[in-house]
Structure formats: C-alpha cells, structure tokens
Image (spheres, rainbow, N blue to C red):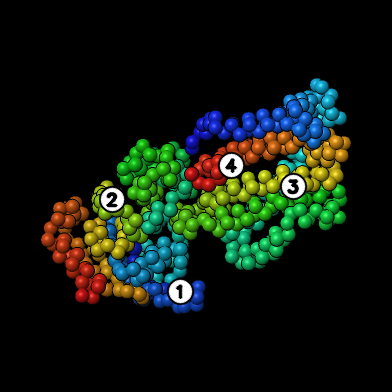
Amino acid sequence: MNQGLVIDNLCHRFHTENGQTVDALNHLSLEVPAGQIVSVIGASGCGKSTLLSLIAGFDRPTQGEITLDGVSVVGKPSPDRCLVFQSPALFEWLTVLQNVAYGLKRQGIPRQDRRAQAMDMLARVGLSGFEKQYPHELSGGMQQRVALARALVMRPRVLFMDEPFAALDAQLRQQMQQLVRSLWRELGQTILFVTHDIREAVAVAHRVVVLTPRPGTVKAVFPVPGSMENREAFLHTDAYETLCAQIGDTLFDR
Amino acid sequence: MKTRKFDPVGWIVPILVIAVWWAVTRFGIVAPYQLPSPQTLARVLVDFATGWYGLTPYAGTMFLHLWHSLYRVLTGFALAVVLGLPLGFATGRVRLLRRLFDPFLGLIRSVPGIGWLPIAIVWFGVGEGNTRFLITLAAFFPIYLNTMQGAAGVPDLTVRAGRMLGARGLTLFATVIFPAAFSQIAVGLRLGLGVAWAYLVLGEVTGVTEGLGAVMTDGRMLGQVDIVLAAMIVIAIAGKLTDWLLCALCRCISPTVRKGGRNA
C-alpha cells in the first residue's frame, strides 16, 4: 500500500471575483513515490499553489483524483499531508514549543509525549533552546524552521513545501536546503517541494517536474543523478550546471 | 514586555497645575464655591470615603455610590460583551451575515450615543433602566466592530495551518480563530469599558438616587463643587482600575497582548 502520492488527470477551473473563468490546471498527472523528494517547478502563475491547495484538501478539483497510498484524499485536509507555506503562518500567541506541539495535541497525544516529540523535532531543525520564545522574537529563517518542525512532527505521509524559502536570503536558503536533505536522510520523509528556483529544485530533490504555463500540466520530468548522501558534492560539479541549464531550457522554451 | 520606568519629567506638569491651583484659591482669585483649594478637596475626598470629618452630606457614602455605579458599568459592559462578541465573530467570519447585519448596525451607530437619551428614558424609565441601556449600547459598538475586524483579519493561512494540523469546528475556533483575533478584540473591550464609564455618568445624572453621577448632580444643585470634583476623581480612579484589571485579564487569556492591545 506504500504507493505514495498519485495525482491523476487533475483539472481545476475557478471563477475570479470579477467573473473571469480561469483554467488553472489541465489534465495534470504526477507521482511522488513514498520516501522520495519531488520538486515541482514552473513559471509564476502556472497553478503550483492551486495544485498544493487541492492536494492538501483545502479545495476540490473540478476533475481528477488524488490518492495517498491508494486512498482518495480529495477535499479532506489532514495531518497526513502537511504543508509548509511560503510564510511561516505560525500561531503568534503560542510559544515555539506550543506551536510545534499543536498538531499532536489535536490528536490527543499526552502532554509528556508531545513535549518530547516536539523537543526532538526542534532539535533536528536546529532550534534547541528557543522553545519558550514567541514567534515574533525569532528571525524569518528561524520562524520557517519552526513551521517545518510543526509539520514534520506530525510525521505526515507527504510533506508539501510551497516555495518555503522564497522570502529568505541566498545564504539562508542554502542552509535550509541542506536542512531539508539532512532531514530526509534522518526521517526518510516523502516531500513534494514547489519552487520557482531551478537550482533549489535540483538541490533538494530526487526528481524535478517541470510544469507548463497556465493551465498547468507536466511538461517534463528530470531525474537528479546520484544519491541524496552525495548531493552536496554534486552541487559543485559541471553535471549539476548542465542539468540546471537543461531544465531552464525546457522551462522557458529555449 | 518592558516594565515601565519611573519618569520624574512626567510629574512636572501635574505638580505645576496643583501649585497654580493652590495659588489661585489661596489668594482669592477664584471663589471657593467655584473651585475649592487642593487641601480642601483632599479632605472632602477622604471624608467622602471614610466619614471622619462630616464635611458634606455625603460623608462616608463613597463606597455605596461606587458600588452602585460599578455594578451598572459591569452589568452593562457584560451585556455588551455577550452581544458584541458573537455578533462580531458571526459578521467577521461569514460574509452573508456581514451583508445582513452590518449595514443596519452601521445605521444605528450613526446616531450619537447621547442622542438615545430621551428615547431611552421613554422606553426604560428615568434611572436604572436607561442608564444600563445607554452603557450597553455605547460599549457594544467598539466591542462589536473590533471583534468583527479581528475575526475578519485572521489570515487565511493561519486558519489553513490549523485545519491541516487537525483542528476543525469548535476546536478550530477556540484554538486558532479566537486567539488570532484576540489582540484586536482586547482593543475593543478596553474602548468599550472606557465608554461604559462615560455613559454611566450620562445615565446617572438623569436621575438615580445612588451612584457617583447622582452625587455629582446633587452636589451641583446644592452648590457643593467640592463633592462634584471628589466624585469625578473617584470615577477616574475606578475607570483606571477597571481598565487595569481588564488588561490583566486579557493578558491571562493571551500572553502576547500588550498594554497597547496589539500583538507584541
């Protein structure tokens, strides 16, 4: 039953407030095998956010099916599928620890256990010692780490990341990408990583899916060679530059 | 949260005012029936509270009147909270309900609170009823409007985060929407309590027998400016104390609510 996430023939059409009809997605099919990281990349406005919103269950698609390990998840938000948003969207009135433990509390996990699990996850994202702070006391990068820990602690079957590092500076982004890779090595977390940054898409994923402009559908899939363990070294090779250039050519129709 | 430091500069103006006040009464520039001297007023105030000197007909009755006034403020304010919070959340979160209620409430709000006094007297009688009606009416609007704004302003992403982490229905409301809106609600509660005290005086001067507003009206008619001023001071202190208690309560509910009412 460990098929991972399967998106089959997804179409989505919605109406804007001024009465326009927008075709956001057009027969999009995509698979995220269990235990892998798949990057989705596309020009802005290609329906990436719509796609995530549909998979997370916040909206229902006009047509098509989304299954997680063989079970339909359409229109059902659940801690099975956790999202890390573009902005941290933390609960400002809760401490860092309470933020991370929030989802566990909803599942009725006893206080001691959820505290232990939250502390463990905070340590993994490098935030030990900050558990009593409030979100506004942290920097943007640290807030995004809290958001990551808050999602990961649920041990979701798929984790979605919606341009999670777009608001961070270049150096911090690289650190965060490194963090994603090391978390994957430790937890084997299945991740769907949405970005508009080609280099980032390659740096964190086993394969890169390129979407067409709106209405979005899959244009091409690029496997990233080598294992995640050797990814750091791969990022300094010519093969990496060539792959990025190739993806860029496909993305921009060059 | 910063603790407020003692700032001696802030005391300069009050001390100057009291000095000038003392001077104009001491040298007969202002007649005592218009403005008693600071030391007289201080004695009247102590007498009002304790009855030690028997200076005015109101000696020793302060707590009786304060209790009546406080009771009116708190019941009127509580009623405004009971009405304002649910309605604010309903119109803030549900577009249809906002379209249904908000224009009507806006219409009512455009009548100044004081403008309700005559009709309130007709409907609820002079005294108790119209006072509480005016307090509730006046306190309702800041509470309702701020709750609506706070509830409508909860970011979609925050609500989504809550749903994603497994909260729905009442749990989602209690653990995400309410706390996210609360700093704005706290602003409304404080404003509401402030106007509750203002409208208390308005209601009480129109004819109740017990209450600080009644003391002020009687004092004026009896030509006892000292007790009028004493009652004003008691109202100011009571208003400040209740505001302080409300703030403390708000901080218990949500630790990130600052004194200013915004999220720190």
Q: Is mark 1 on a helix, strand or loop?
A: strand
- What is the chain identity of the residue bearing mark 4? B
Q: Which of A52 and A116 is in front in this view?
A: A52
Instruction: Please determine whether, in this image, residue B45 is positioned above or below residue B256.
Output: above
Q: Which of marks 1 and 2 is nearer the N terminus?
A: 1
Residue A9 seen by the camera: no
Q: Name the residue under label 2.
A: A172
Q: Mark 1 points at which residue?
A: A14
Q: Mark 3 points at which residue?
A: B199
Give amino acid for label 1. Answer: Phe
Give amino acid for label 3. Answer: Tyr
**B104 with respect to A96 (left or right):** right
**B113 with respect to A170 (left or right):** right
Q: What element carries label 2?
A: helix
Give amino acid for label 2. Answer: Leu
Q: Name the residue under label 4.
A: B250
How far apart are the alpha carbons under marks 2 and 3?
55 Å
How far apart are the alpha carbons under marks 1 and 2?
36 Å
Residue at (70% x, 63% y) in the render: B107
- What is the chain identity of the residue bearing mark 3? B
Q: Nearer the viewer, mark 2 or mark 3?
A: 3
Q: In the rendered structure, are the residues bearing label 1 and label 2 in contact, judged by CB atoms less than 8 Å apart?
A: no
How far apart are the alpha carbons under marks 1 and 4?
42 Å
How far apart are the alpha carbons under marks 4 and 3?
23 Å
Q: Which of marks 4 and 3 is nearer the N terminus?
A: 3
